[in-house]
Image (spheres, coloured by chain):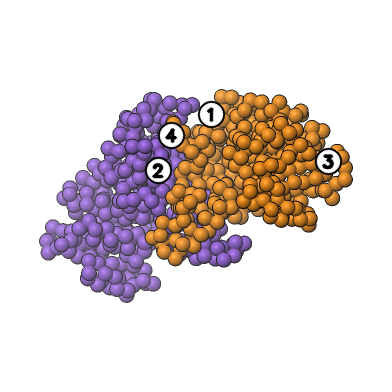
Chain colours: A orange, B purple
Amino acid sequence: MPLVNDTTAPRIALVGATGVVGTTLIQLIEERGFRYRAIDLVASARSAGREVSVEGRDHRVHDLDGFDFSRTDVAFFSAGGSVSTTWVPKAVAQGALVIDNTSAFRMDPATPLVVPQVNAHELEQRPASGIIANPNCSTIPLVRLLRAVEDRWGIRQAVVSTYQAASGAGYSGIDELREGVRTVLEDPDSPGVSKTFSPSLAFDVIPSIDRRLDDGFTFEEQKMLQESRKILGLPHLDITATCVRVPVVNSHSEAAWIECDAPVDRDELVRALAALDEVTVHDREELGAFPTPRTAGDPNRVHVGRIRVTRTNPRAFWLWAVADNVRIGAALNALQIAEALVERGVL
Amino acid sequence: MPLVNDTTAPRIALVGATGVVGTTLIQLIEERGFRYRAIDLVASARSAGREVSVEGRDHRVHDLDGFDFSRTDVAFFSAGGSVSTTWVPKAVAQGALVIDNTSAFRMDPATPLVVPQVNAHELEQRPASGIIANPNCSTIPLVRLLRAVEDRWGIRQAVVSTYQAASGAGYSGIDELREGVRTVLEDPDSPGVSKTFSPSLAFDVIPSIDRRLDDGFTFEEQKMLQESRKILGLPHLDITATCVRVPVVNSHSEAAWIECDAPVDRDELVRALAALDEVTVHDREELGAFPTPRTAGDPNRVHVGRIRVTRTNPRAFWLWAVADNVRIGAALNALQIAEALVERGVL
């Protein structure tokens, strides 16, 4: 009975409740039995007024414009960076603690950037800013693995290429991929559909996610470096990435090459990764197995495969990680932050 | 008039004439006006007897079983490794020079492994084995770029992740991707179609190409290391790769991170790559441009973008390369080997 008549359970608000992360957050609240005293679904004017079911009860979606956060204990924001930039400070001023899924406050020194499996210790008290930031979808699974590598072997540098799914751009990304693929199947010379993605993602890969920075890297690539450093508390960590969108509906993959300070024993590495919370190593029994976005299995776990030490450098190894970017990379991490806050009595 | 009555023009045979590489080789012979005195199309029993048009003339496809290479000057083999292993030695024994598209003889010391833009000097005379090997489709575009980097900055190490298209597995790969995508569009929970690829490539990425080796790398990944070393004449070159199949119909992409011995100036690097034969650099004018498999343009050129020096290491940079794997990575390279042999009077 997650909706409880218990004054210790928080009153929650979901901003962006009708988007792909918001919808998944509702599913996860149901699946995990997260206890709350009241729930408000909030969205932009476009979606306000819709009825959305949470645990069999219909809730009318409130318009964010004019919503009062003074009776909210914790607000989850998943409606994009510009919405958070405008509305998160108002929600905080009205007394809500905010768990923000966007990049708006991640690098703010007064705001902890948290992956509960890595740095839940930063949730011992209410943060100065009133905000806890949820990291980028590609960063979350990676830092959960890097923590174990750093602790045992020391990370000298990491080189990462991503294979990111359409759902990272929300329902419009998913719909556009499907529509584009349908169009190109009918006419192989069609440019496909291109509004959310440019060019169309249908049967194509796009080596550019989020805006381009002056040095030629994208903001998405910079996030992986800066956020990993902050979460792991390693200000000099050297991670470089190329972030690429691929025509997959959901779940991001990453090919990570990691050079350590010490030689790496493959069996020990496999054991160290398999021992992590909510991580499944797919090649523990045999080298032939590997996870893919559609076949990895449990969407609430990080899936790892292709673990292999390079022949030319015994301090360096590769791994292949697959994680549901909407769950692991956004909604589940946000909810696990809330669960950790409840556990610590902060909420 | 590529079909010429000129006893100096070679008599050619195309083995695997009805496959995706063979078909493209015929197109390229037409497009480039490659001069030949006679042409024989050869394939397995399954395709023998078909009529295939070359420059408006119909040719009946011969059955490889029983084909006599004694009247062939140069035979192009593109029918898979096991066909080459069996038939290339016979063709050579019957007097033909063989240009082999498979991995069967690439690492044979008596067989040059040639990318004409890199090591055409190895084509000055008929090789001892009677065979010239065409490298792997992912290796060819990469070594064409690495040559310039090595010469100017020295390569300390390269870390490469690939995004390889379905056409690398021939027409059956292309057909299976299209059919699988159609199936999954209709029923998102369908496993898709999986015969050539495992699991289905529809809306998925598969981090495993070719067979798995004992150390956990795939043969495809090993090829990139061993073949690059041989072509570039750098036996200690350190390249490590993760090779991944993506749901793209044609053209392979690669995200390559290259650490050099000396600091790299981006502008100089862009100029050096743009100066290469048949290479187009997409971000020469502005940082925002990049090539993708469907939008890169001229399929006879290697397309490069996302060139950027890392902030944490001024000796290291990333690039993103896109090349038509059937043309650049197979048929065009093979034909350019033949053109170079003709130019040098070896054919």
State whether residue A31 is above or below residue A312: below
Q: Residue at x 54, y 51 (%)?
A: A173
Looking at the figure, which quarter contains the C terminus of chain A?
top right
Q: Residues within 10 Å of mark 1 (few under 14, many from 20)?
A: some
Residue at the spot of label 3? A9
Tag 1 near tag 3, CB within 8 Å: no
Residue at the spot of label 4? A216
Residue B290 - label: 2
> Given the image, what chain letter belongs to the residue carrying mark 4?
A
Q: Can I make out residue A332 in this image?
A: no
The answer to which of A266 and A195 lies nearer the viewer is A195
| Mark 1 and mark 2: Cα distance apart in space | 25 Å
Residue at the spot of label 1? A238
Q: Residue at x 75, y 53 (%)?
A: A59
Q: Residue at x 36, y 49 (%)?
A: B296
Q: Can you name the residue that lies furthest to the bottom here?
A: B49
Q: Residues within 10 Å of mark 2 (few under 14, many from 20)?
A: many
Tag 2 near tag 3, CB within 8 Å: no
User: Closer to us: mark 3 or mark 4?
Assistant: 3
The answer to which of B92 and A145 lies nearer the viewer is A145
| Mark 1 and mark 4: Cα distance apart in space | 17 Å
Under circle 1, the secondary element is loop
The amino acid at mark 1 is Asp
